[in-house]
Structure formats: C-alpha cells, structure tokens
Image: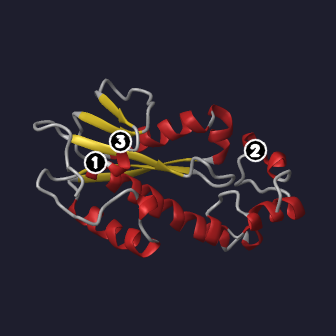
C-alpha cells in the first residue's frame, strides 16, 4: 500500500495532471487532501489501473477526501504559454478551489511553479509513491477522459472517445484528411504528426 502522507503534522495536497502529451483537448490537473487515516490498497498511479478501476476509485476519492478539486487549462492557453506552464497553471487552478488550505504541496514530477508561498515538494513518479498524488492522478485522468468522450460526440472522426486526444493512428489519419479543430493544440507541430508512419 502507498504511504498516505509525506509529513506527520502538515496538511498535504497531492497534485497531478493528465493530458500533457495530447494533440487535442485541455490539460486537467487535480489536487487532493486525504484524511491522515485514509487507506485503500487499490489506489495507485492512474496509468496502472483499468478504466473501470479508475471510475470506481474516483467515487471513493471524492467521497472520502477532506478536499479535492480539478483545474482545467484550454488548448489556446496551452499554445500561448506552453504545455509545461499550462500543466502548472492547471494545478494552481485546482489548488485555488480547495476548501481547505494545504500547508505543503506534493507535486508529481521534477518541476513546479511555486504557489502562493505554500511549500512544495516535487517527487518523480510520485503517483506511484504517495496516496494523495495517486488520488490526484485518478481524478485528473477520469475527469479529462469524461470531457474528451463528450467532445468526441461532436467530432467523431478523430476517435477521441478511444484515444482521448493522444496521437494514435486514427487521430493522425483524421488530421491528415480533415485538418484540425479549435480543440487541437496548434503549438504541438501537428503537421509533423503526419510524418509518422500510419
């Protein structure tokens, strides 16, 4: 089981994002504060879980967390400030919405833009090391997937209901045939995607 906390006496918020490597759609991030005695042996890095497991755990996390929130940054903002800064901004937006102010932020990854003088700790592969970060990864992933599935109904040719905006074969083929939408990230050099073998 993943440890629930890094410190013994501080209110911790785990933070993670979803959708950094996508060609289309927003980047989502979540911040989660879990009770100190919370335990769940099935919570792990969202990439290690099935869609069914993630969906179930989203309900568990949202029902049991002291506080949780999701932040979203649009493709146009991603194009303006780059995906790394957009990921940090999405985390900031999530932290903004927490109804309990954390005393330390546990960030998945090796970089972060400081938030309102709250100390932070960057942890590489933190979503596989700490429960609160893993919980944030699950919320970010499930909320983003749900958004992309809804968006796919308007743009079925890109197959976003399955690829969620990542550069999979059907997505790249659709870009080659149909061009891009307002939901694509123009700064991601989309034309170069077509050079990859289908």
Residue 97 horizontal/vertical position (percent): 35, 46
Q: Nearer the viewer, mark 1 or mark 2?
A: 1
Q: Marks 2 and 3: CB-CB under 8 Å? A: no
Q: Secondary structure under badge 1?
A: loop
Judge whether residue 137 can be spotted in this image: yes
Instruction: Judge depth for marks 2 and 3 and give the one in front.
Output: 2
Q: Earlier in the sequence, mark 1 or mark 2?
A: 1
Quadrant in the picture for residue 42: bottom left
Residue drawn at x 46%, y 72% as measured from the top left: 51
* Residue at (70, 70) in percent of width and height: 159
The relative height of residue 72 versus residue 176 in the rendered view (above or below) is above
Report helix, strand or loop for mark 2: helix
Front one among 151 and 163: 163
The residue indicated by pointer 3 is 95
Which residue is pictured at 32% across the width and 68% down the height? 57
Mark 1: give few (<14), some (14-19) or many (20+) Cα within 10 Å: many
Q: Is residue 32 visible?
A: no
Q: Position of residue 102 (x, y in %)?
A: 24, 38
Q: Which mark is residue 130?
A: 1
Tell me which label, 3 or 1, sits earlier in the chain: 3
Q: Secondary structure at mark 3?
A: helix
C-alpha separation, residue under disc 1 versus residue under disc 2: 34 Å
State the CA–CA distance, disc 3 to disc 1: 18 Å
72 and 87: which is toward the camera: 87
Q: Rounded to the nearest whole Å, what is the CA distance between mark 2 and mark 3?
A: 27 Å
Disc sitting over residue 186 in the figure: 2
Mark positioned earlier in the residue sequence (2 or 3): 3
């Amino acid at each position: 089981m993943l440890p629930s906390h890094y410190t013994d006496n501080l209110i911790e918020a785990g933070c993670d994002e979803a959708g950094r490597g996508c060609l289309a759609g927003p980047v989502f991030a979540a911040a989660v504060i879990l009770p100190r005695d919370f335990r769940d042996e099935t919570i792990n890095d969202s990439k290690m879980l099935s869609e069914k497991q993630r969906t179930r755990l989203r309900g568990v996390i949202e029902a049991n967390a002291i506080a949780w929130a999701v932040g979203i940054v649009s493709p146009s903002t991603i194009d303006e400030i780059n995906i790394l800064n957009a990921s940090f901004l999405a985390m900031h937006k999530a932290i903004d919405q927490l109804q309990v102010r954390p005393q330390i932020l546990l960030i998945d990854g090796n970089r972060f833009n400081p938030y309102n003088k709250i100390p932070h700790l960057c942890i590489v592969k933190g979503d596989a090391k700490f429960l609160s970060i893993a919980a944030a990864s699950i919320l970010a992933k499930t909320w983003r997937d749900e958004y992309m599935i809804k968006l796919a109904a308007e743009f079925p040719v890109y197959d976003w209901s399955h690829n969620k905006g990542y550069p999979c074969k059907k997505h790249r083929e659709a870009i080659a045939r149909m061009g891009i939408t307002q939901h694509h990230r123009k700064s991601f050099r989309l034309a170069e995607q077509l050079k990859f073998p289908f």
